Image: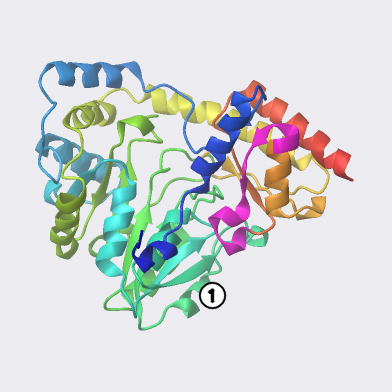
């Protein structure tokens, strides 16, 4: 079969590859502790499930508008105003099956040969994958462990050229857990406002899972609402990964292009999921609060436990539910650590280089697992490292 040469530039998300490897070992009788997948290990809150079931029974089983149900877009617009202090119209919102299409559509609309896109590295791998797929030049925003995985603002400003059309910001970030301060976002906003044709894709999917500081959206800063695409969804905050529902808030010039891409690819998001999402935003928020409180305890367990392993350095994650320790002191590469963790220790985690070249020397562990399993995993990893010395 002859396939398009563009396919060779398209990457993947290694978490799902590792999940498949881990499950294959489990099928052979191995006990594997899963710290590879970025998915809350909580059930969707009951009131959201009940609304989804009621929507199915009420006939929300047909196509809806490509942009999303009007009542959901109105709810999202109100929520964005409440959580970011940004006044947006429901007409600026496009609802999609999961949040990844917002990445796809934004990058596909703005990236092409001759264009440069700045993206976080280490960062969510789909950013770099899609930039290269669209033929644009992927320019990394290095996030280094010695800086607490926060950007060097002087270096970031220097990386912007007259060909830069899009900058991706992810806070709190995957895989690092770093949460950008308002001061950092103000600096980034000043770089963007200095250019006539530069926009920001602000990935805010982890905005509700923060332990240190508070969430700040770059869209809330002066002059930035019309230069920012907000990416968000329901998977992380409400443990709704399987419901496949995300959304983007777009400046007016972009929305018509995004709708064309959505109509040509997914048609629309599931109507019953959208009805459940209204209840998620307007209903009780106890589930979110309780989940974050539990993640806070797990964060302490995993960060402390990792620092007790010889040769491992681990900053305290500021948000999301990932630890991104530097394991260079163990004498292993990131890939070797990943392989030995799975095959020797029975712990599924990810090499830092799966998130970009600047992830070298690190690994990512998702602490979306029980406290008991986290403690077991830490014991196994410590035994593995000590035994290798």
Given residues 193 and 229, the one toward you in this image is 229
Near-viewer residue (242 or 222): 242
Residue 319 in sight: no
Asked if one can make out residue 128 in the rendered structure from this viewpoint, the answer is yes
Figure quadrant of residue 346? top right
In magenta, the rendered stretch is 343-359
Percent position of residue 93, x then y: 18, 48
In this rendering, the answer to whether 48 lies above or below 69 is above
Farthest residue to the bottom: give it: 162
Measured from the top left, where is residue 231 in percent x and y? 32, 50
Can residue 348 be found in the magenta stretch?
yes
Q: Which residue is mark 1?
A: 155
- Left or right: 175, with 306 as reference point: left
Q: Is residue 182 left or right of residue 149?
A: left
Tell me which residue sits at (65%, 48%) in the image. Answer: 363
- Look at the picture and state if 198 lies above or below 229: below
- In percent of width and height, residue 107 lies at 31, 63
Residue at x 15% of width, y 65% of height: 253
Q: Considering the numbered disc 1 on the image, is that residue within a helix, a strand or a loop?
A: helix
Q: Residue at x 64, y 25 (%)?
A: 28
Query: How many dots with numbers?
Result: 1
Q: Nearer the viewer, residue 248 or 21?
A: 21
Percent position (x, y) of residue 137? Answer: 41, 74
Of the pair 137 and 74, the residue shown nearer to us: 137
In the image, farthest residue toward the right: 389
């Amino acid at each position: 079969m002859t396939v398009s040469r563009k396919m060779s530039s398209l990457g993947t998300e290694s978490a799902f590859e590792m999940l498949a490897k881990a499950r294959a070992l489990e099928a052979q009788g191995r006990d594997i502790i899963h710290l590879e997948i970025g998915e809350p290990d909580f059930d969707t809150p009951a009131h959201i499930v009940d609304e989804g079931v009621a929507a199915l029974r009420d006939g929300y089983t047909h196509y809806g508008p490509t942009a999303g149900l009007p009542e959901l877009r109105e709810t999202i617009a109100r929520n964005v105003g409440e959580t970011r202090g940004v006044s947006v119209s429901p007409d600026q919102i496009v609802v999609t099956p999961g949040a990844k299409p917002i990445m796809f559509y934004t990058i596909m609309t703005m990236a092409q040969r001759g264009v440069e896109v700045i993206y976080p590295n280490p960062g969510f791998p789909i950013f770099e994958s899609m930039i290269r797929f669209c033929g644009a030049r992927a320019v990394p925003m290095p996030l280094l462990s010695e800086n607490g995985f926060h950007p060097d603002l002087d270096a970031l400003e220097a990386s912007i050229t007259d060909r830069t059309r899009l900058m991706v910001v992810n806070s709190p970030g995957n895989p690092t857990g770093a949460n950008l301060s308002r001061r950092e976002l103000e600096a980034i906003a000043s770089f963007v406002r200095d250019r006539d044709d530069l926009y920001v894709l602000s990935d805010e999917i982890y905005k509700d899972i923060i332990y240190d500081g508070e969430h700040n959206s770059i869209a809330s800063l002066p002059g930035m609402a019309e230069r920012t695409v907000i990416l968000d969804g329901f998977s992380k905050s409400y443990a709704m990964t399987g419901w496949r529902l995300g959304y983007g808030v777009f400046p007016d010039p972009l929305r018509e292009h995004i709708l064309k891409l959505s109509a040509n690819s997914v048609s629309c998001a599931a109507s019953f999921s959208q009805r459940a999402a209204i209840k998620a935003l307007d209903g009780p928020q106890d589930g979110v609060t309780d989940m974050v409180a539990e993640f806070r305890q797990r964060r302490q367990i995993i960060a402390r436990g990792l620092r007790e392993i010889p040769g491992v350095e681990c900053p305290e994650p500021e948000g999301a539910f990932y630890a991104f320790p530097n394991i260079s002191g163990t004498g292993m590469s990131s890939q070797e650590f990943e392989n030995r963790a799975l095959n020797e220790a029975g712990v599924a985690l990810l090499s830092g280089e799966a998130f970009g070249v600047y992830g070298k020397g690190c690994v990512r562990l998702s602490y979306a697992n029980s406290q008991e399993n986290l403690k077991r995993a830490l014991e196994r990893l410590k035994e593995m490292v000590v035994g290798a010395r």
